[in-house]
Image: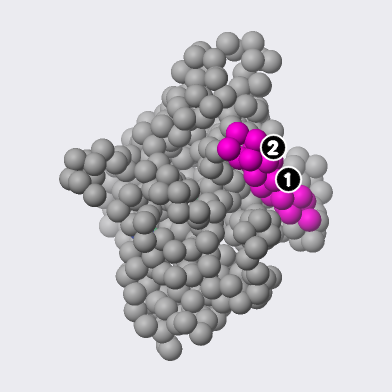
Amino acid sequence: MTKEKKKKETLNPFEIAQRQLDVCAEIIDLEPNIHAMLRVPMREFHLSLSVRMDDGSAKIFRGFRVQYNDARGPTKGGIRFHPEETIDTVRALAAWMTWKCAVVDIPLGGAKGGVICNPKKMSQSEIERLSRAYIGGISQVIGPDKDIPAPDVYTNPQIMAWMMDEYAKIVGGNPFGVITGKPLSLGGSAGRGDATARGGWYTMREAAKQCNLKLENATVAIQGYGNAGYYAALLGKTLFGCKIVAVSDTKGGIINKTGLDPQAVYEHKVQTGSVVNFSGSESISNQEILELPVDILWPAALESVITEENAPGVKAKIVAEAANGPTTPEADEILYKNGVHVIPDFLCNAGGVTVSYFEMVQNMYMYYWDEDDVHRQLDKKMTAAYHSVLNCSRKYEINMRQAAYVVAVQRVAEAMRLRGWV
Ligand code: NAD
């Protein structure tokens, strides 16, 4: 790989999202006006949030909310609390939410939010005050029929409960449907906790059939051991009998070729703060985990981790992108050429927003489904979405990511035309 070529690979998620859209626009010969509108967010909000810290001082945090496109319905998307959050990451994630809601055919547009902060270094009461300040800053532009936030990296059901409560204080009443991913006792949905990984495994079940891969005892490596990664490990073992051989988090990775116990690894992480040093395992790096000789690889941490540098070393037969944007366009081409079946991010991880949508529906009806109903409805949505993408990839002879774009962008473009926007 030449130095000149290295320079060309952008790791900026929004530039990547725009390039992916440009490829799709060419495949479907998208009208220039629709293409131009879909390349940038419809609205974005930049916030300066003053938060009282425990020592009495005030600290200023930067926050963002990007509403990318609402042609198909109110926008929807999670909120990240992360020290390296940038507006371009939020823009990219908001774009991918637009395609995600469209590919699983739920009546929502895409949005995303974020605050630059390090929640690992903040107390619970500081996180609560920051969460309330953030909602105070965007309260006029969110709502059950406008824009509905949810959890993402380093935000959780407790944070969603504070945010919903703050919104309720501002507008009055109990508008539970303004936020999803809430605790079960506060209008949350059964089955939301593991929905992202479960939805991913439903698409994996279908992909395995296409790749003639037997899931029982198939070997699995997972980068990231938060909500998406932990449940990917747990469900891989319990639902399909896969062997989870390696997992990782920010502090590093672990491997045990005879298989790890996902629940025991989780408990070790809760006690020690990391999966590292789990008994009976050996250490590996976050880079090595991506190139292990396994059947299935789940990138389940952050974006741009599979690049043109390491893509040639990926040996998995199927890559299930639980994380958003883990693969650069250059890496995508390499994986495709090497015959790796990629279940692209906004298809693979759409289970989370799908159950969030079920949560909104239940909040509106004030009637709650049991877990089996949620799983059944989720399976239906994910299986249908996987097959519409697979059929599209065969029809146009394009890779699975391009096919997911074609399915999603055509649906959003149709709504824009019908609304008379272009
Ligand atoms: P989380 O905060 O629960 O967990 C993130 C995990 O990634 C943690 O284990 C952390 O240690 C690890 N991590 C962070 N940086 C890392 C690095 N550089 N190398 C290795 N590990 C690292 O977050 P989550 O909800 O599991 O989200 C993970 C990914 O899945 C993100 O890309 C998110 O956007 C995507 N996603 C999540 C959901 C959901 O419902 N949780 C839905 C769709 C997509």
Q: Left or right of 40: which side holds 28?
A: right
Q: Left or right of 414: which side holds 62?
A: left
How crowded pointer 2 is (Cα within 10 Å; few <14, some 14-19, many 20+) is rated as: some
Q: Is residue 389 above or below residue 45?
A: below
Q: Amino acid at mark 2?
A: Asp
Residue 389 within the magenta-colored segment of the rendering: yes
* Magenta segment boundaries in residue numbering: 376-397
Residue that label 2 marks: 105
Q: Nearer the viewer, residue 213 or 253?
A: 213
- Secondary structure, mark 2, is loop
Q: Amino acid at mark 1?
A: Ala
How crowded pointer 1 is (Cα within 10 Å; few <14, some 14-19, many 20+) is rated as: some
How far from the left and from the top, in percent, is residue 310? 33, 57
Q: Which mark is residue 143?
A: none
Main SS category, magenta section = helix
Check whether the beta carbons of the residues at disc 1 and disc 2 lie within 8 A of each other: yes
How far from the left and from the top, in percent, is residue 209? 68, 59
Residue that label 1 marks: 384
Work out whether residue 380 can be spotted: yes
Residue 15 within the magenta-colored segment of the rendering: no
